[in-house]
Amino acid sequence: MIIPIFLSVVICLLNLSCSGNGNKKITIEFWTMGAEAEHVQKLTKEFEKLNPNIIIKVQAIPWTAAHEKLITAYASETTPDIVQMGNTWIPEFVALNSLDSLDDLVAQSKTINIKNYFPGIWQTNTIDGKLYGIPWYVDTRVLFYRTDILKKAGYTSPPQNWSELYDVSKKIKKMYGNQEKYSIFIPTNEWAPFIIFGLQAGASLLKDNNTLGNFSDDKFQTAFKYLIRFYKEKLAPVEMTEVSNIYQAFSTGFFAMYITGPWNVEEFKKRLPANLRNDWMTAPLPAYDGNPYPGKSLAGGASLAMFKSCKHKKEAWKLIEYLSKNSSQVEFYKLSTDLPAVISAWQDSTLKEDKYLKAFYMQLQNVVPTPKVPEWEQIVFAKVQQYAEYAARRKETPEEALKSLDSDVNKILQKRRWILSRK
Amino acid sequence: MKKIFLYIILIAVAIFCLTPFLWMISTSLMATGQSNVFPPRFFPEKITFAQYINLFSRLNVAKYFLNSTIVSVSITLVSLFVNSMAGFAFAKYKFAGQKGLFKLLLSFMIIPAQVTMLPLFLMLKYMGLINTYMAVVIPGIASVFGIFLIRQYLLSVPDSLIEAAKIDGATDFQIYISLVLPLAKPILITLAIFTFMGAWNDFLWPLIAMTNDSMYTLPVALANLMGEHNQDTELMMAGSVVTILPILIVFLALQKYYIKGIMIGGVKE
Amino acid sequence: MNKHRRKISAAYFFLAPAMITIFIFFLLPVLAAFLMSFTDFDIYSLGNISLAQFVGFRNYIEIFRDSLFWIALKNTFYFVIVGGPLSIVVSLGAALLINSKLIKFKGLFRLIYFTPVVTTLVAVSILWRFIYHPRFGILNYVLSLIGIHGVDWLGDPHWAMPAIILMAVWKNFGYNMIIFIAGLQNIPEDLYEAADIEGASAWRQFKDITLPMLAPTTLFVGIITMIGYFQLFAEPYVMTQGGPLNSTLSIVLYMYQEGFRWWNMGYSAALAFILFFIILVVSLIQLRLQRESSV
């Protein structure tokens, strides 16, 4: 046919990537998310200088669409060599049989040593006894709070347990009287607090070899109801778009506490007005009543993983090792303010002197992974958030919401049950 | 009196139509954070092109612009060719099953494109075309609407012109190239604008078919930026201006043809 | 005879490129989607096709039990039933205004009204997201000038869909307006002249001449508007992601999420066919109603 040929010629002429492969250098495609892409390029340039035969092509994927993009890349067989992967996603890509296990490489490595990593974080990268990712940077959620407001409410130190968190919230709300201000911000489009409090209360989240939802059990229900109470008693705002700019809202005292991650340390430093500089702090999460402080939080962050499709494994691994070096980790922190995954990097003065990071260091000793099932992403983003919102807006009672949540989760896990039953 | 009243309504609607755009342009010229004030600012305190510079230097918008242009121009050129041939066949030839085929084609218009997307994605994936310009261009080539538009127009061209050319010994293809295409020029321009705009503004399919950010078209890139920078209103407004401006210019230059196309499509139903 | 045959082969030659692309890239996928809607094709199956199985009508049955589907269906109908007629009324009003003999600068106004139509939906959605901002947006500011306390348009489940409808009408009315103008210009002038002589009021003329004469145009406009409105996607995708409380989740958005976010492609294909079926039925009803009312 004339037309398709004509078309391919036209498009080929226009398409720059059609040009022939002239150079003999090895190109490693490296996908990273959002701002990390920008920062890591400084490190990869350094790496390229040290290894003149390797070119690192860094591509940025926006965080909000990152999971979607990775899955799409898998579906369209356009996966890169190395990827920065949120560590809750690793099980999914392992189930899809698309990641390479790294155990042998680590065993031979002089740079990467398991003892130099936070145990909870390392664990997230291990599926059925095999390692699929090297922690690159870590994150976990802690409590950000306004010291001045808490002080006025009678708290000179942050809340240590659930009762205190509730109590201080009540007191802050009382201080404001009828003003439209709140104690704490728990946005329903963030699943993390709901899962964290559930884990703190001892909930297993899923049951029967992770094939059925277990959100209706007493433990999760206790946690869920505890959080929903904050909306009910107007301690937390339900309408999220009200808080279209959290930094502004935090500085005007629209809310005094917010459970969020390390990326907000720099944002808060940068965006809060100067006079507030000494009026906010971070603290590890309060614990379930009766449990030791601090309470558990999520083992988050990103790992470096290698796709099976990677053609130059040796070179790719070289880059992973390079990025895991103590000095690279410190350097990357300075560039991106992403917290180092390598513990020894925390001894660097830049990290040690930052008063806001102490809470994170403490919290990272007590982090746990979420259930390692491929469907987890869909469960939390599509379902936990949906029913948290339903309960917060009182469309359903917490009991109803959790029951529907379980039934939806069971539906999502249906295929998993089928596949497991075939084995 | 009645006249004044009518003008008041007319102008009010015009304001309703235009204010959003003016506000968009004005906000895009503000420094970061300037637009988040109450009451809203209608004019920048100081005009700055910082957002645009940011878009082109840091966020690679030139590449998306190029992608959009390549995709839209390719679709337009190829589809003009393909659809005008089919329209010509339906208007000026008689063959078995002609009416039935035409009716069948028209009935396809009711099938929402979304139905085809999943298999189309898989199909293009197996052909290795996902993430290439072809993935967006190919499904955009044949358009029932385009065939319909051309057929309607050519029906009004007297057969005698074509017969005369045939007596002169011209082949069918020669007739198509040197007689039909020039005759159909107005409707071809109309169809070209329709196709170009549809391709430029299309969102869902490029979103699915272009999985690699170096292949994004402007709308896809813009929606993506939105995810990352939704706090930066001024930047997003600048992105919107960059996306809208080219299409607006094309439209303003050729609006006569565009509006005529809608009228043909609408009235001779 | 020979000449006749040559003519036919020429016709096929001209038809071939269009027909082949339509067959391969439209018809075939439609059929494939239909088959797919009876399987549990998902992300696992993409890697290993043996993990896909025929499940009969399970997807369809599950959809009917799926509360999100009903929410999406309700939202989509809300958008079509409120937004569609509203857009048509505004279009007709604008067409009548511009077509009025008392008005000058017709071309200019027509152009201005038409501008939103040609602009990119994604860009416009981003723009309107800002217009609807509860504190810094101009809509609430304008409302406050006339003493109305604004709402959190996109954040309130009751207002999010009306907000999307308002934007859709703003964006689309110009298109139908042009079609109506063409329809109005086709109405013979002497009908109005005769009515003037009989002393019929402007309203009577509108009701007894304009509307009936415009009926075919209105039907056409009604059907294309409805088909388009049933496919609501980019506005909620960009502005609300379907929220708050799923109040702007449309069928196509739900289909996209199931299909291309979670890769439940069998389920998603079934959703697409249900949408197709709905559009088909509603179009037929519209045609039937029109036929009956014109008898």
Image (cartoon, coloured by chain):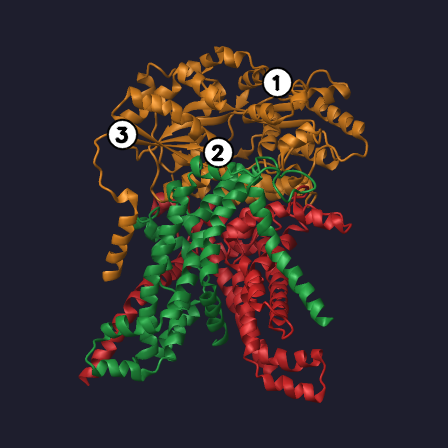
Chain colours: A orange, B green, C red
User: What amino acid type should be assigned to the residue bearing mark 3?
Assistant: His
**Which chain is disc 1 placed on?**
A
Q: In this view, does A260 lie above or below A237?
A: above
- Local crowd at mark 3 within 10 Å, few (<14), some, or many (≥20)? few
Nearest-to-viewer mark from 2 and 3:
3
Q: Nearer the viewer, residue B264 or C33?
A: B264
Q: Name the residue under label 2.
A: A209
Of callouts 2 and 3, the N-terminal one: 2
Residue B46, position in %: x, y? Answer: 59, 37
Q: Nearer the viewer, residue B148 or C81?
A: B148
Q: Which of A129 and B137 is in front in this view?
A: B137
Q: Name the residue under label 3.
A: A312
- Local crowd at mark 1 within 10 Å, few (<14), some, or many (≥20)? many
Of callouts 1 and 3, the N-terminal one: 1
Nearest-to-viewer mark from 1 and 3:
3
Q: Mark 1 points at which residue?
A: A294
Distance from Cα at disc 2 to Cα at disc 3? 36 Å
Q: Which image quadrant: the C terminus of chain C? A: bottom right
Residue B109: numbered disc: none
